[in-house]
Image: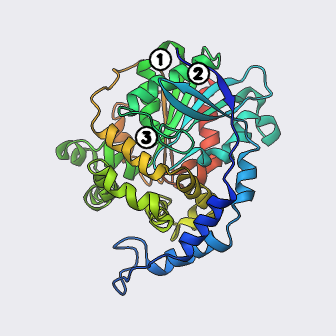
Amino acid sequence: MADAEIRPFRVEVSDEALDDLRNRLAGTRWPSEVPGAGWSRGVPLGYLKELAGYWRDGFDWRKQEAELNQVPQFTTEIDGQTIHFLHVRSPEPGALPLIVSHGYPGSVVEFLDLLGPLSDPLAHGGDPADAFHLVIPSLPGFGFSTPVTEPGWAMARTTRAWAELMARLGYDRYGAQGGDIGAGITGMLAGVDPGHLAGIHLNSDPLAVGAVALPPAEQADAAAVTDAHRATLARMRQFQADGLGYLHLQTTRPQTIAYALNDSPVAQLAWIAEKFREWTDPAAELPEDAVDRDRLLTNVSLYWFTGSGASAAQFLYEAAHAHEWPGPSEVPQGWAVFAATDDLVRRLIDPEEKLAHWSEFDRGGHFAAMETPDLLVDDVRAFFRARR
């Protein structure tokens, strides 16, 4: 082991970097757009101009930076890579350690509203027996887990790094939670480190399932036995057809899109804002109807200031070309599905209802920790209550 030291970390963006961001936003060369297209061809010009203007003149990064720095943060080197993580220890001595993994285009910022309720439930109207010690890493190539030192950092290697991180922190028995890429890593942890895991909890939404886990057409059609099922399946298939352009580009030509994401804050803003419009609660007309606008811009700013739009794209490329997939595990597994209007997802994922825990919520969406933190907190508590 080269360097197992755990070092305290603070977010410190320079005044020069803030000035550079504002200057680039002010000097944006805006494109034209097709009249009346709305969101059908991507982020509308008027919406993005207004959001970028607020990012430049109204958004207070220093306030968000100070909030981030109230959270204990650290870095350590694992397998030659700097790993940044939040580490919030509960005041409850019997708390269960829990490693929480974000996805794309997310970051540790997603989980700020979960920190208090999960680590100190008594102070937030909950039962102290439900307390967790929280470990929330930035994926390699995301946020402050940059720069990436070499190729090969995909999900399996990241999963092994997470197991090493928990061991390095002295956590012999722990739980894991995640959504999007984080759900994949959490699932892999059950195969990589089963002897130390109390259970794994995943959150998802129907579109995400349609993107990565939709079974063959005959099987999916057989599962969709009601009109509501068939409508959900149609949305999943439509998302496969026209909602994955960002993924196809980043899993085939990540270096090409990297130039735009690293050089233009408006490009990075549009790239992320589009997903917060398409993947959040279907009832939300705009991204800020689903998540707090300042929290969204804090997430985007983290990508911008660290240059991780480019390296996150490389992570997606690595994941798409990886061939290492840990085997199945007997670790108890729970799911929480958000924006679920029927039970089709369970019929597709768990037709024999063998999973230890399943919950469906008719609100929220892909970014559950930001959209409906109350629902996610309650479900995580409920799943792990019997597994402490």
Q: Position of residue 282 (x, y in %)?
A: 47, 63
Q: Quadrant of residue 157?
A: top left
Q: For mark 2, what is the residue?
A: 166
Q: Give the mark, 1 or 3, whose residue is nearer the N terminus.
A: 3
Q: Give the mark, 2 or 3, whose residue is nearer the N terminus.
A: 2
Inspect the image, locate mark 3, and give the three-letter code of the amino acid beneath it: Ile
Mark on residue 282?
A: none
Q: Are marks 2 and 1 in contact (CB under 8 Å)?
A: yes
Q: For mark 1, what is the residue?
A: 193
The crowd level at tag 1 (other Cα within 10 Å; few <14, some 14-19, many 20+) is some
**Label 1 to label 3, Cα distance in Å?**
18 Å
Q: Position of residue 276 (x, y in %)?
A: 49, 60
Residue at 52%, 51% in the rendered image: 367
Residue at the extreme front of the image, as rendered: 16
Q: Position of residue 24 (x, y in %)?
A: 54, 70
Q: Secondary structure at mark 3?
A: helix
**Label 2 to label 3, Cα distance in Å?**
19 Å
Inspect the image, locate mark 1, and give the three-letter code of the amino acid beneath it: Asp
Residue at 73%, 58% in the rendered image: 62
